[in-house]
Amino acid sequence: MLGSGSTGNAIFLESGNNKILIDVGFNAVEIKKRLANIGHNPEDLTAILITHEHIDHIRGAGATARKYGTPIYLNPDTYHASEAILGNIPQVEYFSTGHPFPLNDLTVEPFSLPHDAYDPVGFNIYMGRSKISIALDLGYVTKLVRDRVQGSGLI
C-alpha cells in the first residue's frame, strides 16, 4: 500500500512478470518517491489499473503513463469520466466489468462496486492458485462483493 486516503490512493503489486500500480492518486513525483521507498522504479511498471475516476485515485495516472510509457487499464465509462484529468494517454487498454483479462502471468477480474462513480470496480487478481482482492471506497458491502472476494488470501 503506497497510500490510502482522501489525499491519494495507490497500491503496488509485483508478480513474476508484472509491476502494477492499482490507482495513482498521487502526482508522478510523489509516486516515484513512494516507489523508491520500497525499492522500485516507475520505469519498471508494466501496467496501471484504475478502479474509478475520482481524483484521489487518478491524480497522477496520466502523467505517470506518459512519462514512463505505462499502459492504463480501465473500463470505458471510467475513461470517459476521467479523460479530461488523465489527458492524452499513449496506451489505453479497456476491460469490461465482470470479464477477466490476462496481464502477463496474472488474470485480472474486475467486478462492480457500490460507489458514487460511473462504473467503479474492484479487482480479483489471480496468480496461479493465489487470489488477491482489491475493493476500495465501498459505500457498503453487497452480496456481489462478498461473493467476489470469497476465497481471497488477501483483501
Image (cartoon, rainbow, N blue to C red):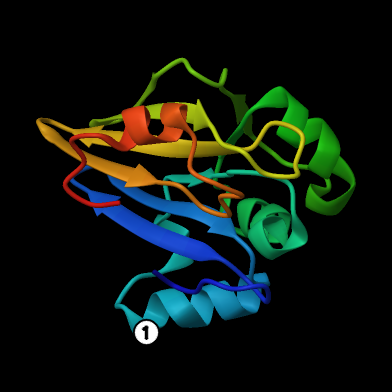
Residue 132 picture quarter: top left
- Horizontally, residue 27 falls left or right of residue 112, namely right
Q: Position of residue 41 (x, y in %)?
A: 40, 69
The front one of 32 and 119 is 119
Residue 145 picture quarter: top left
Image point (75%, 34%), residue name: 79
Q: In the figure, 135 relative to 113: above or below?
A: below
- Say which element carries label 1: helix
Residue 71 picture quarter: top right
Q: Position of residue 2 (x, y in %)?
A: 44, 72
The front one of 20 and 97 is 97
- Horizontally, residue 153 falls left or right of residue 88, namely left
Image point (83%, 32%), residue name: 80
Q: In the figure, 83 relative to 39: above or below?
A: above
The front one of 49 and 33 is 49
Q: Residue furthest right?
A: 84
Q: In the figure, 39 relative to 76: above or below?
A: below
Residue type pointed to by label 1 = Asn
- Horizontally, residue 123 falls left or right of residue 91, namely left
Residue ID for mark 1: 37
Q: Position of residue 99 (x, y in %)?
A: 46, 15
Q: In the figure, 46 relative to 78: above or below?
A: below
User: Callout 1: 10 Å neighbours few (<14), some, many (20+)?
Assistant: few
The front one of 92 and 97 is 97
Q: Position of residue 83 (x, y in %)?
A: 84, 41
